[in-house]
Image: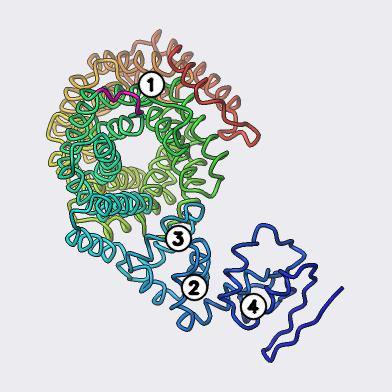
Amino acid sequence: MKVVFRQTSKYTSYIKYGSVVAAVWLYSYVFSPLLGLVIFAVRRDNLSRKMAVEYNSPSLTGLSSPKTLYDLSVYTVANRFIRYKKYFTYLPENILFDIYYQLYKEKRLCLLGAEFSDLDIFSKMLKVRNRRVHLLQIFQALMDHGIKIGNELTISYNICCLGINKNSCTQENIINLGLRLGSFLSDAGWYAESEKILLTCRDLCVNDSETRENWCRTLDCCHKLLHAQAFYCAFRGAAETHQLALNTIKKLENAGYKDCSHAALYSEFSVLFFMRSEYDEAYRWSVAALKELKPSLPPRIIIDVLRQAAKSCVVKREFKKAGLLIRQAVYLAREIFSTDHPKYGDALMDYGFYLLNYDSVINSVFIYKTALVIRKEIFGKTNLYVAIAREDLAYALYVHEYRSGKFTQAREQAERAIEIMEKLLPAEHLMLASAKRVKALILEELAVDYRGSIMTNKELLLKSEYLHLSALHLAQTAFGERNVQTAKHYGNLGRLYQSMERFQEAEEMHLKAISIKEELLGPDDYEVGLSIGHLASLYSFHMKRYREAEKLYFRSMAINLKLFGKSYSGLSYDYRGLLRVYEKLHEYDKILEYRDELTLWKELRKQYLQSEDSPIDLYKCAEPTENVIKTFFLM
């Protein structure tokens, strides 16, 4: 049976119905869309798709596909937003979210910004957990539109805390709101605002009563606060948060509470030490986090723990362990959150880091590009997450195109990363040091390969030097002299000065880099081998110190063979360097020997590249995480 209802508006709706609910719904849609939303909220899951309206007016909805009655009512309420706003307090959060999302789709951002700047309204939106990606998109669109919603919410929350009374229930609610809001702001990439809110939460927790519940709440706050501080390179504050967390854990243990998992917190400890380039501590805490994992923990925490443990294994050159963990994180994120979710993008970023360090550069570039697409779709163009994805992709492209000299894409990504960071960060922020380092490396190679005027070549090298010195200064300020990041910057300056024919300065920089790296990482670390190879190149190609270069090449080669095997890409530099040495020393038997070694390497490298599997298996499912962890500890 088909019934036609005619309205005085521009369109006619047709509906097949088989129940009183359908008729009541249609009546409510015609005369009161808001009432229709409430009715539909009750029967939404039970109504058949047969109750859809054939509604094909792009001028009204912006879409030409058939619309359900619910969709039409959301559109109508959004279209008459001011008229119905006074009734919104009666709507469930999920329906209210749909109305706001309709405003977002219609790009009515000023109205939406005014609504979301209201802390009460935004707190309701935070409760709609299954629409988190859409909320992130809305939030970023408002920030891009010039609406400082992050600052507005931060101020509102602080005012809310000032008016807090001694009612324990009220204080608990305020703390929980701050934890949700601070966590969301971190997820959105606005770490400075997140830190401000979570610091207020921390103070409320610390000043609250000494109870088990409050200690657990304090640890939750420390976990979220440490995440924001470590990522944002606020290391002084992060050290204080780290100590508070350790003290609180001790209180729980002394009181006899030992049954709660600290996996998420230990993983953030690892992140902090990783960001500070203290890799032994980063690895230790990531292993502790793995031991604390339980199947009952939220999937988000499990994935984050696996990701961070994998990164810690990479810098310790435990590649088999790293591969096991990061692949589990990728497949678990895809299975639980889908491929358009930020958590999947995060897992891909760390997978790209693993692949790049494991000498699978082409696959690394592919993975980084995929992660960048996901992040741009969620976070738009001007967001720290997008900037970091661009920086990491730029470096992977730089490594991939090192022999070809085609650095156009790499340079573009590095410059866009710096452009975003300069808009969002203070001028002397440490994040800029890393991005500037990547651009400096690219400019140096462009200068070396440049076929134009000498002046342009010199200008590129001077720009590269300025960026390297700026990055070194930022690293020294943040970490001091005896730090891996500082050593890396010395090494980069050494390579640059070699290109600029300032050979004594180049040697000085390389020796500084080697000294610091050996002290912190040991004599056989990859980073040490890298710097030794660079110094060998300086001695053999520019300073005619061939015997010293020979010893350094042998040492570099031994480190590379131990870590990566005979097909490692970096071995070609060692073999070519030794050929240069023996040609200059007229040792022809050695020349023949290492020509054969280079030929064998080329064949092995070709076989390795041909045998590489696709980085993502489209049909593979995640393993039970407890099995993966068991395998990890047996390796």
First in sequence: mark 1 or mark 4?
Answer: 4
* Count of marks overlaid on the render: 4
The answer for how far apart the CA atoms under marks 2 and 3 are is 13 Å
Could one spot residue 491 in this view of the protein? no
* Magenta: main secondary structure: loop
The amino acid sitting under disc 4 is Tyr
Considering only order in the chain, which callout, 2 or 4, is on the residue closer to the N terminus? 4
The residue pinned by badge 4 equals 29
Residue 258 lies in the magenta stretch = yes
Most extreme residue toward the front is 167
Question: Is 195 positioned to the left or the right of 334 in the image?
Answer: left
Residue type indicated by callout 3: Gln
- The answer to whether the residues at label 1 and label 3 have Cβ atoms under 8 Å apart is no
Q: Quadrant of residue 284?
A: top left
Element under disc 2: helix
**Disc on the earlier residue, 2 or 1:** 2
Range of magenta residues: 256-260
In depth, the one of 29 and 111 nearer the eye is 29
Residue 513 is situated, as x and y percent measured from the top left of the image, at 19, 28
Q: Nearer the viewer, mark 4 or mark 2?
A: 4
Q: Residues within 10 Å of mark 2 (few under 14, many from 20)?
A: many
Q: Is residue 561 above or below residue 376?
A: above
Sequence-wise first label, 2 or 3: 2
Look at mark 3 in the image and give the residue it sits on: 137
Q: Position of residue 71 (x, y in %)?
A: 62, 70
Q: From the viewer's perspective, tell me whether residue 25 is left or right of residue 556.
A: right
Given the image, on which type of amino acid does mark 2 rest? Answer: Leu
Estimate how packed mark 4 is, as few (under 14), some (14 to 19) or many (20 or more) residues with alpha carbons within 10 Å: many
Q: Residue under circle 2? A: 103
Question: Which residue position holds label 1?
Answer: 291
